[in-house]
Image (tube, rainbow, N blue to C red):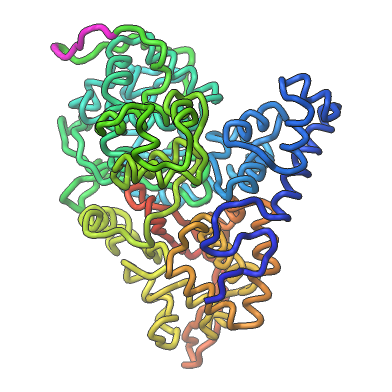
Amino acid sequence: MNNNPGDPGIQPLGAPSRLLPSSLAKVRELMRSCRQKMGLSQLEFANRFGYSERRYRQMEIHGDISIANMHALARQLEMSPSVRAQFFFFLTGEVPVRGLTIDEMPTVGEGMKRVAAGWARVHVYAQADPAVLIDGCWNVEHFNEPWYRIFENVRSHHQDHPLVNPMRFGLFHPEAPQIFLDWKESWVVTALCRFSQRYYMNRDNAELQEVRERIRRNPFLEEIYTRRVGRELAERGIDRLTEGDVQERPLLVPGKGEQTILVTMMAPWFGRHSEYEVVAFSRPDSDEPLMEPPPTRELASCEPYRQPDEVCSATAQTAPPPGDSPPPGRSQPDTEFALTVGKLLLEYRKKTPYSQDQFTHFARLPISNGLYARIERDKQPPKKEILPDLGRALKMPLPVRQLLYSLATQAEPPTLSVSGGPETEKKTQRWVRIHLASHRQKAPAVLMDGAWNVKFCNDAFRELFAHVPAHPRNHPTINPFRYVVFHKEAQSTLAEWYDVWLTPWLVELGSALLHNRDNPHPEHVDLYDEIEQDPFLRDVFHGRVMRDLRGAGTTVGFESDGDLRGMHLPVQEADGTSQRRYTPMLVTAGVPLHLKKTGELFTTMTPREPR
């Protein structure tokens, strides 16, 4: 195996994390340009923010920056969301959340709106079941007619209506317990677990700060948040944040009464670093839509629902269901976040026979007692390199280790493998029945694992590529990545093959290798090695692809989701001859939430009118 991708800004596969020359140059450039934009010298900046001049010079010139200083410097240097994403990426190789709403991302906001609109045409408006697309603060971007009809009789509220913000509705609207049945157990606890993680990762977000304050003013919600949420996250780790996908819950459906519904979720590929999601409600064991077909009419607008002149009396003091009121919680100084790095470490260290002072010695950790004490007290974040040692020493289950990684690095953890195991198979089959089955999804659609091997595809997808010559590995119904990159026929079928198809797929491989650089998946390494054997592909990968990744980190390429890509498809003419006809395809992609830890990808290709 060739262990070096050949690019000076990308670490050798499997090498320990460290800042390489081109990454250091980029960090230096970003810090200097932001500082100069503020009109400050190194000394002036250091004095303003409490650094010694020597320490700041070490950070700017040599890249000697801890995770805590990384986040502080991003704020102090007034970095925009896109610059901050690049800054974090070149320091850590990870991509943190880059803004939860379009308003937080002015440099890409218009592009995100365009992509979101195209994406919603397929995964929201075309769906027979209620569906909604929400941003990282759970604000509604798009909803369909069935979603509207589920909630059309809810009293209006400028913030807490389900057509404005489903999370706020579920927590704060007085009618939520009457619609979200089994309100506490089926809806509120899961919502607060997800909010807790989102808030910890984005503690400077004003919308999340406001939600936290409203939770604090509500004794019922505050009790759950401070006493239960942290415990459940510590026990189940990252799985607690995704188990809401493919989950049965009770819902009051207009005209039908209490119904058991199946909630499914998907993270759009264009918004995967901004926590965007689409949520759908379906019947658990029936192909019939949850709502009856609507009357022949169209919604006047797909925009979030706001009627400020008809605001109801919803307040932060949402009442718990009758007979379900817990005792008042005591105010504690460390309850701002339900779970932190320090709280998680303390929870697991208490299961060992060791005190805080004894732990590093007996666990043989490569850090001092004093440093561990500061980490456990949340005075200093741990370096990424010691997280595996901490997880093993504390005997944390794998999902909890992933959560620890996420809390400590403020980024998504590396994927565990390229495919879910038996524990996710049943959920995946139910998810596929809702989103991919031929009688529900008319457009060509495919679910691939993290190495782009096909797990499920519908009849329309098979028909789309029926003309492609058979190949044991490189056929699109076996592995679309290998088809685009290695199958010669792809250049005939895929219009603008190099720019529109080949390069984005290679970018995805580069992103996967970067995201798992410390422990790359063998399937990705095999693909990389095969690319290395082809001079043309090798030049593309180490040239344009790595240049794109260096310029924007692994956030590059979101614009490829929701875009039109052309195909030259064979058609039979009246005289019996076969011709190729250009057909534009709206290509969309997303990750089923319960498969996020393996990076499995759902893709649709919706034909549009040919030009």
Instruction: Please tell me which residue lies in front, 301 or 426.
Output: 426
Quadrant housing the C terminus:
bottom right
Is residue 247 shown in magenta? no
Badge count = 0
Q: Residue furthest bottom?
A: 576
Residue at 50% from the left image edge and 43% from the top image edge: 384
Residue 86 at x, y percent in the picture = 66, 45
Side (left or right) of 370 relative to 279: right
Side (left or right) of 558 relative to 239: right
Q: Is residue 95 above or below residue 433?
A: above
> Residue 403, can we see it?
yes
Residue at 31% from the left image edge and 32% from the top image edge: 349
Instruction: Please tell me which residue lies in front, 511 or 389.
Output: 389
Q: Is residue 324 above or below residue 253?
A: above
Residue 523 at x, y percent in the picture = 43, 70
Q: Is residue 16 above or below residue 68?
A: below
Residue at 38% from the left image edge and 85% from the top image edge: 472
> Residue 141, can we see it?
no
Side (left or right) of 462 relative to 57: left
Q: Main secondary structure of the magenta part?
A: loop
Side (left or right) of 229 relative to 113: left
Question: Based on the displayed image, in which of its 4 quarters is residue 494 positioned?
Answer: bottom right
Residue 474 at x, y percent in the picture = 44, 81
Start-end of magenta stretch: 323-329
Residue 357 at x, y percent in the picture = 38, 27
Q: Is residue 352 above or below residue 17?
A: above
Question: Based on the displayed image, in which of its 4 quarters is residue 455 positioned?
Answer: bottom left
Residue at 30% from the left image edge and 45% from the top image edge: 264
Instruction: Please tell me which residue lies in front, 604 or 125.
Output: 604
